[in-house]
Amino acid sequence: MSSIALQDAAPDVPRRKRRGRRATLVIGIVFVAAVIVLALVSLVWLPYGQSDTSGTRLEGPSGSHLLGTDKLGRDLLTQLMIGARIALLVGAGSVAIAAVLGLLLGLIAAFASPWLDDTLSAALDVIIAFPVLLLAMLVVAVQGASLWSAILAIGLAQSAVVGRLVRILARRVLREQYITAARTSGTRLPGIIAGHVLPNIAPMLGVNLALQFGVAVLAEASLSYLGLGAPPPNASWGRMLQEAQGTVLTAPVGAIAPGIALVVLVLGVNFIADGLRDVADPTRSSR
């Protein structure tokens, strides 16, 4: 009887794991969707003007100011909504730059001669050795502090990580027998890339780009916290944290609200990436 019970219970284990991963993916989508809705609403409606300082300084949550005000009398909910817009813009822009440059560099390295491959790989490894925030700070210091400088800086820093991954995945695909058959049949390089390489590396590349989105959001918040992100009157979650650090004991909502927003967005993106990883690697789900 005990062996029969064990056999009946065994299939339930992977089933419970699949349900858990599905729930994680759903939670991630809900978290990210909430931030997207907040950003979209900010495009058509805001409780107060972006530079409106008519509120009482460090006012607590109330009917007129749902999250209270900061030390300048600005509405915190308004700043939080604008910060959601900036966070999504930086994440999407940085990931787009990283995807284009990383895909180009990775494919060149994968199809290049050995010496060029070694040179590009070494260059990518050197860039990866530096933290994303440090490289972003260097680019912003040269270009000047602005929203677009932050997007460019973070995207350039992340392109090395994407390029390294694309090279590894592409070289793995190029060792397959169907690539040899395609070359033997006369398929040209663009056809091999579009028909075989890109479709096979797309799932894992999508997972990595989802993770890079979260890294970009945190990097932008860090740059803004240091005063190197989007300049005022743009409201960034990182700048909100920096401005609230001196009043965190008397008006904690000013630090708690952007902190929770950052956690929700980054956790949501990571949950989605984890769900995409299960889709891209079915053997991982079965294990």
Image (cartoon, rainbow, N blue to C red):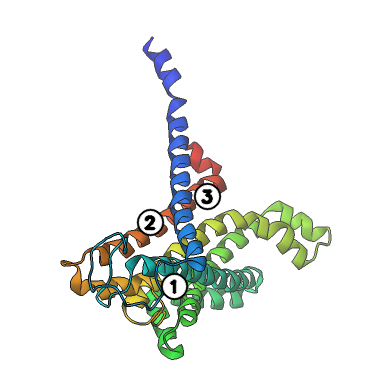
Residue at figure coordinates x 43%, y 69% from the top left = 82
Residue type (three-letter) at the residue carrying disc 2: Val
Q: Which mark is residue 276?
A: 3
Residue at figure coordinates x 19%, y 74% from the top left = 246
Question: In the rendered view, would you say 8 is above or below 70?
Answer: above
Looking at the image, can residue 129 be seen?
yes
If you read the primary sequence from the N terminus, does the residue marked by circle 3 or circle 1 appear first? 1
Residue type (three-letter) at the residue carrying disc 3: Leu
**18 and 190: which one is in front?**
18
The residue that label 2 is drawn on is 264
Callout 1 crowding tier (Cα within 10 Å): few <14, some 14–19, many ≥20:
some
Residue 165 horizontal/vertical position (percent)? 53, 64
Q: From the viewer's perspective, is the residue at label 3 or at label 1 nearer?
A: 3
If you read the primary sequence from the N terminus, does the residue marked by circle 1 or circle 2 appear first? 1
Question: In the rendered view, would you say 14 is above or below 125?
Answer: above
Q: Which mark is residue 69?
A: none
Give left or right: position of 125 versus 204.
left
The residue that label 1 is drawn on is 128
If you read the primary sequence from the N terminus, does the residue marked by circle 3 or circle 2 appear first? 2
The quarter holding residue 198 reads: bottom right
Give left or right: position of 190 versus 120.
right
Marks 3 and 1 in Cβ contact (< 8 Å): no
Residue 184 horizontal/vertical position (percent)? 81, 59
